[in-house]
Amino acid sequence: MNYISTRGNYERVSAAEAIRLGMVPAGGLFVPEKIPAFSQQEINEMKDATYQVIAYRVLEKYLTDYTGQELQEAISAAYNRDKFTHDVIAPVIKLNDNTYILELWHGPTAAFKDMALQLMPHLLVKAINKVEIDREIVILVATSGDTGKAALEGFKDVEGIKIIVFYPKDGVSKVQETQMVTTGGKNTAVVAVKGNFDDCQSGVKEIFGDKEYNQLLNRHGYQFSSANSINWGRLVPQIIYYFAAYVYLLRDGEIGAGDKINITVPTGNFGNILAAYYAYRMGLPVNKFICASNDNKVLTDFLKTGIYDINRDFRRTISPSMDILISSNLERFLFEMTGHDAKKINQWYRQLKEEGKFSIDEETNAKIKEILVGEYATEEETMETIKETFTKYNYTVDTHTAVGIKAYHKYLTKVVDHTPTVIDSTANPYKFGKAVLEALQGKVKEKDEFKILEELKELTGKEVHRGLKGLEEKGVRHKRSCSSTGIRDEIKDILGIK
Ligand SMILES: *Cc1c(COP(=O)(O)O)cnc(C)c1O
């Protein structure tokens, strides 16, 4: 199985090479040349398989240059009871007759990023060995919150790799910051940047493109790579849980063999929903995908009008992991929807860069609408949904999951659809505890975020997620900070380069 660029500007590469490179160097994203598939019978036969076995079945189709043993090792190292506190890794909870919640936050950091970032480091290490690079890999991460901690946990103490995370000093919550700066491991570094997320992100991106700086690092035995969802190594593990969810529903008798389901995904960078789409292309019976957005509803508008337009105000919301205007992975989806038309992709993304918008053709638009619908939830609707879900089902959801539930409900007001629907729960409610507590009981006076978690625990009776428990008592291990123009020097200092 080979991987090609969405912009037609790179040679075919193996999976290991795509994972090592992260992104196509000249711009563009790696996608599988041909999407592999399961027969309906093969899917039915997975009915009694464990998460780990399903993982193997999916990965072996995409990572054909990895040996069976390499895949097994990576899977056992990632999806075990030390890392995930649930036997089935990603359990499906029944909310009512037609609605199921897929809990993706049983990993170490309480957000769904763990589903991929627990596995990806193992894939990357094996990729490096395959292409015989003798330099140490330095993963650079710019984070607005969830990715930083999940990447730190995933790459902590992984041989041959260093990880450096940059976060905006005043742009993350106290809980998120504490999660990051208390991380152990000999190969981790965390730096607070005086500036906002964009300063971190552009600082890091500039470094990826800085030839001279990269050469300096190479001379010292280092090479940069990336751990965000533009990397195929982060997407492929996410396909697994869509098959697992389907198989679990089959096993529990909630659906019959071959029955279609809907999948609702609270969406930011379009990575999670794209993984669901790949599962569908591989044979998973899906009726509709519901792409859920918050007030930054670029995608909702795009799915209605065919015009992708980021000329609008960026809104800070209570579902911050979805506060994004440019959903990187949409490019991969459009590449599929146009039948691999790299010319169109180049044209649209040039327009996006120059004018902040592009408009797709009628034919592609019609094709997208057959399978994908977009809905969004306002801040108020998100809060109401948290409250309603708790009152009706005694089930607590975080703000992102609530956006998904609301979007599904809005979809149901427009069409009659009795298809069983799986809604992704992308974070544990304690990760966004303040907003959740306010949704449940009104304005919260308490300022200390850790005390708020205790209040939420009293109210819901649910244990605080282990990744967030006792955080305030853990020692701070990372105290570095720099200005947005000081990122290059900070990296040199961390790596001991003069
Ligand atoms: C990252 C994240 C999302 C968005 O996922 P994408 O793959 O970027 O669409 C949604 N919810 C939470 C809690 C997240 O951390």
Image: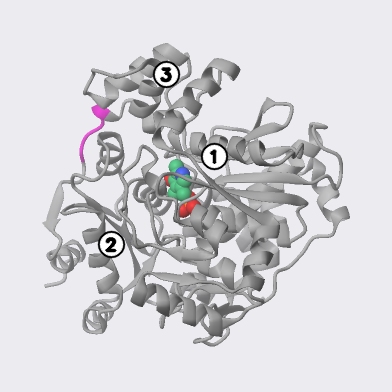
Q: In this view, does 183 lie to the left or right of 44?
A: left
On the image, the x and y values in percent for residue 495 come to 21, 65
Against 327, residue 393 (above or below) is: above
- Element at label 3: helix
* Structure colour scheme: one colour
The overriding secondary structure of the stretch rendered in magenta is loop
- Element at label 2: helix
Q: Which of marks 2 and 3 is nearer the N terminus?
A: 2
Picture quadrant of residue 344: bottom right
The answer to which of 204 and 435 lies nearer the viewer is 435
Against 68, residue 250 (above or below) is: above
The residue at which mark 1 appears reads as 404
Against 227, residue 265 (above or below) is: above
- Within 10 Å of the Cα at label 1, are there few (<14), some (14-19), or many (20+) other Cα atoms? many
- Within 10 Å of the Cα at label 2, are there few (<14), some (14-19), or many (20+) other Cα atoms? some
Which amino acid is tagged 1?
A: Gly
Q: Earlier in the sequence, mark 3 or mark 1?
A: 1
* Foreground label between 2 and 1: 1
Numbered mark located on residue 201 in the image: 2
Label 3, label 1: how far apart the Cα atoms are: 18 Å
Q: Disc 3, ligand 1: is the CB inside 8 Å?
A: no
The residue at which mark 3 appears reads as 440
Which amino acid is tagged 3?
A: Leu
Q: In this view, does 456 lie to the left or right of 73?
A: left
Whether the magenta-drawn stretch holds residue 372 is answered as no
Q: Earlier in the sequence, mark 2 or mark 1?
A: 2
- Element at label 1: helix
* Foreground label between 2 and 3: 3
Residue at 30% in and 74% down: 208
**Residue 247 in sight from this viewpoint:** yes
Which amino acid is tagged 2?
A: Gln
